Each structure stands twice: as structure tokens, then as C-alpha cells.
Amino acid sequence: MSTINAYLTKDALNIKQTRVKRDWMDKTYDAHAYHCFPLSLANSIGYEISCPEDIKFIWNGIDNSSQDNVTILEGNKWCYTGRANATISFNSGIIFKTDNDLSMLHMPVPNMFNDSYQAFTSIISTSFYDSFFPIALKILKADTEITIKAGDPIVTLIPISLGKMSNIELTLNEFEFEDEYYRYHNERNKINKEIVESGKWTDWYRDAVDYKGNSIGSHEVKSLKLKIKDNRGNNG
């Protein structure tokens, strides 16, 4: 089991495993979006970062090197505009320490959409990086007061091994089974349609079976369990 150490100041942002639930998924018919196993699994990847208090800011639409184009209306303790170029940055108060074979990917929260801002995607070598973890957003909507509610995820942080990724080789091959492929999938899609129209779910992919119920493999994992051990005591 890999272990990541996070050192938090008393005014650090919140950190926990990224939640599965999404407001837009709740609103789908009978919350059917949660039956999409790839979607739900991706929702829970990594650690979400949130702020203990509301953050409110406004951008005047000018995108240049001046930090004065963004005004923080609430939450100055937690964020600042020093990176300029229509961005807002956060005082994370968190220093990560990982082994050499782990880095931290900073990215938008998976499948949580908005048109007001987007988290940058970046990778930090946390085996030696000794400053507070940088967290920043690009503002997309001008002349509008934007509020990030206390506890709402701002970004997701994902531990990744760049070493393992860099040794992957992608081989391109000729696809020689088109007739067989389409015969199989035409029959599969026909049965899938009948099941869906009856108001049920196939869960074929979730269970790693074909449309006849035969096992066709296994998932690497079916749920992500990211443990958090809090050693900060009562003052944490």
C-alpha cells in the first residue's frame, strides 16, 4: 500500500476522497446516471479539495498580467489574485510528501461541470516539492459574481506514477474482425434495448459479463478506497 503524507496548517483547505454524487446525476430519471459504472468510478478518483468558507469573486473580463482585474468579494483569507491572467489561486495550507514514484495530478473535479471557472491541470513532483501545494482556477465568466460554496469541491488531486505511465507502449493494429464484431454487437444492442425499455438495467459492464451472462474478464478494481488517517489530534 502506498502512503502519502500531507502536512496541514490550522487554516488549510479541506481534503477528502472525491465524492461519487453529482447534482446533475441526481436529476436524471430515477438517478439512472449512477448506473453508468465508468462514470461513477471516475467520480470517486483522487482527493477533492474544498474551502471551509464561501468564496466570492468577480472578473472584469480583461485578461492580462494585472492582478487587479479580479476582485475577491469574500474569502480573502483563502485565496488571492497574484497569478493574474483571469485566475484565482488558493492558499492550500497543505504540503504533500510522496515517494519518488508518485506525483500529484491537479485537475478539474471529474464530471462536475460549470461555465464560470475551470481548474488548471498540472502535475507536481511531490517527492521533493516543499511548498504549499498550488491550487488555481481559470475564470471563464466575466462581470458576474461567482460563488464557490463552503464544502463544494474546487479541484481534485490524483496520485499518479509517471514512471509507470512513461513505459507504456501503444501498438496500432489492423482490425480484422469487423463482420464478427458487428454481428455480435447488433444482437447485443437489440437485447440491451429490450431490457432498457422495460425499465431495468443490464449492468453487463459493471459485472464484466457478456449479454448472455458469461464472464468476459474482471475490473482492475470495482471501487476506489482511498484511506485518510488523521494524526492531527483535537486541534486538527
Image (cartoon, rainbow, N blue to C red):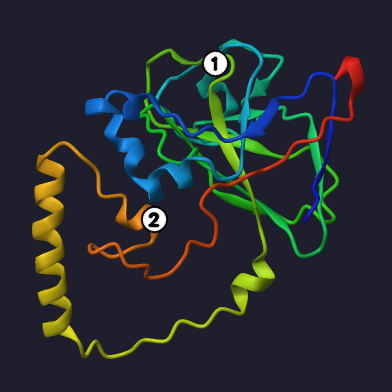
Res 100 quadrant in image = bottom right
81 vs 130, left or right, is left
Q: CA distance from mark 1 to mark 2?
A: 50 Å
Q: Earlier in the sequence, mark 1 or mark 2?
A: 1
Res 90 quadrant in image = top right
Dot 2: element: helix
The numbered disc on residue 217 is none
In the foreground, 75 or 232: 232
Identify which residue is drawn at 12% across, 57% down: 191
Image quarter hosting the C terminus = top right
Q: Residues within 10 Å of mark 1 (few under 14, many from 20)?
A: some
Image quarter hosting the N terminus = bottom right
As displayed, is residue 90 above or below residue 133?
above
* Tag in front: 1 or 2: 2
Q: Position of residue 225 (x, y in %)?
A: 64, 44
- Amino acid carrying label 1: it is Thr
As displayed, is residue 85 above or below residue 27?
below
Identify which residue is drawn at 51% across, 16% down: 57
Which residue matches tag 2?
Answer: 207
Which residue matches tag 1?
Answer: 71
Q: Position of residue 186 (x, y in %)?
A: 9, 67
Q: Position of residue 139 (x, y in %)?
A: 45, 30
In the foreground, 39 or 85: 39
